[in-house]
Image (cartoon, rainbow, N blue to C red):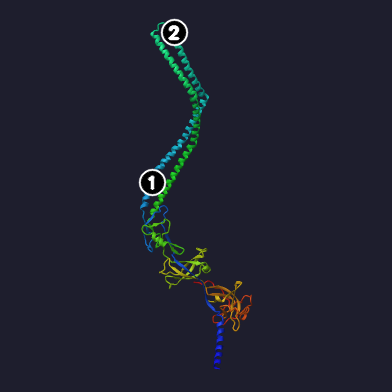
Amino acid sequence: MLLRRVLLALVSVSVPLQLAAAEPATYTVKPVPFRIEAKIEGTFEPPQLVEVRPDMRRWTQLVVEEAVPHGTRVGKGDVLIRLDTEKLDETIRDLEMAGRLAAVALGLLEREVGLLEKSTPLQLEVAARARRMIEEDVKRYEAKEAELAVATNDKQLKAAEFFLENAEEELAQLEKMYEQDDLTEETEQIVLKRSRFEAEMARFNAALSRDRHERVAQFDLPRRREFVDTLAKSSELDFEKAQAGLPVALEKQRLELEKARNEQRKAAENLTELKAERERLPIRAPADGIVYYGKWRQGKWTDADSAAGRLRPGGQLDARDTIMTVIGPGKLALRAGVAEKDLARVTVGYPAKVVPKAFPEVKLGARVRSVSAVPVAAGRFDAVLDLAEEHPRLSAGMEAEVRVIAESRPDALAVPKKAVFSEPLDDDARFVYVAVEGQEPRKRSVAVGRANEELIEIAAGLSLGEVILTEKPKADEKPKGNDKGSGNGESKEGEKPADAKPPAADAKPAEKPAVATPAAPAKG
């Protein structure tokens, strides 16, 4: 009997416990602190900076002799980098000497061009005159001299034969005359001897004339004809060559003169720039401040290690690369990268809290100065924040954690995000399950506002003090249709919830559903 009573008692206790364990978790609607913020990271940025680069356009052999250490405080005009200038000085001296020689050569070329400008017309006139004279000679040869040459050749042969005939006839007459005398006198022998010699010479001259006549007729006259024709053609070509070549030669010399002048001008400019670059050495501080190696890009110091290596004695500098940066005095700013998902929460004018990573106990106020309109990298925007106060231990390049406050209210009507559900076919249709004492949970449509990581703002559909489920009821539990709500705040399914202002914190649950009015961005 006793055992039966014990068993009945245990059963009566376990059943309520099981029922209590099966009930879903709930949340009582109440005013809560509500904040929307973006957590980003940034780097303290110098207020003013001046990049230091060799800025040498002509001279690129920039070998370091010495450089001030990283972090050195300098004044405007202080020496930052000393370079080896021995080769530069030697080059300047060589260019000065080359410039003087070029000036002499240019003067000589100018005189040559001047003389050529005067002689070219004369040379053209000489060529034209030679052509005209040859044309006249050819014309005369064809008209007279060719026939005269043939006639002369014939006449010379005829004369030689005539003289031969005359000499032989005279000799024959003398011999015949002297043969009739039985006695030949000594004088007669002399006359005969001379006559025989003359006849012999006449025969020789006749033979020679016949050979000459043959050669002249066969070779000399045709060759003379060819020579005259060739001379005429050559004269014409020489004239055309003079007409075409002399002006071109003159123009070429003029261009050579212009080229020489340009080269002299460029050499003079090069020398002037090299001298100016030499005057800029050694490299001096452009402003008061602290020297940082490298350059500042998008909130980061870059190339600091590379710059340190190049600034060692014997290091080679790039003529146009930033090698140092001088940070001027003033209040630091903060440059931060904003992820695309946080862009709506980071707007110009929004307040922020800044915590330096090096000094987590330090809390600094700030305000967003600017946000880039376009991404500076994939999914990343650039923001600059102004600090409300300074801190003596902070320096440019240090990093910080930043919370940009987009909205902050102490008594917003907000509930856990897990308590608000969406319709399967309409993500914009939101609802909650309202717990009703002694009844099944009732599904109720709500209007929502902004949300943070944990809470979502309720714009309409719930009243302070109401209890909602933070998880869906079990599948076998089928909630009734939309809850009628409390008091005048009841709503039917498909209708918008009634609006009502939230009551004071110590008030009882309102008769109408409360409406949370969206708040303006918090003022820092």
Q: Quadrant of the N terminus?
A: bottom right
**Which of 423/476 is in front?**
476
Residue 98 has which mark?
A: 1
Q: Residue at x 46, y 40 (%)?
A: 252
> From the viewer's perspective, is 513 left or right of 284?
right
Q: Residue at x 46, y 38 (%)?
A: 249
**From the viewer's perspective, is residue 210 above or below residue 389?**
above
**Which of 145/398 is in front?**
145
Find numbered disc 1 in the image and state the secondary structure of the residue it sits on.
helix
In 3D space, how far apart are the residues under numbered discs 2 and 1 (Cα atoms)?
A: 101 Å
> From the viewer's perspective, is 281 left or right of 453?
left
* Image coords of residue 339 (percent x, y): 51, 67
The quadrant in which residue 50 appears is bottom left
Find numbered disc 2 in the image and state the secondary structure of the residue it sits on.
helix
Q: Residue at x 46, y 37 (%)?
A: 117
Residue 409 can be seen in this image: no
Q: Amino acid at mark 1?
A: Ala
**Which of 240/410 is in front?**
240
Mark earlier in primary sequence (2, 1): 1
Disc 2 + disc 1, Cβ < 8 Å = no
* Image coords of residue 240 (percent x, y): 50, 34
Residue 218 can be seen in this image: yes
Residue 395 has which mark?
A: none
Residue 177 has which mark?
A: 2
Residue extending farthest top: 182
Total labels drawn: 2
* Image coords of residue 262 (percent x, y): 44, 46
Dot 1 crowding, Cα within 10 Å, few <14, some 14–19, many 20+: some
* Image coords of residue 172 (percent x, y): 45, 11
> From the viewer's perspective, is 74 left or right of 491?
left
**From the viewer's perspective, is residue 21 above or below residue 77?**
below
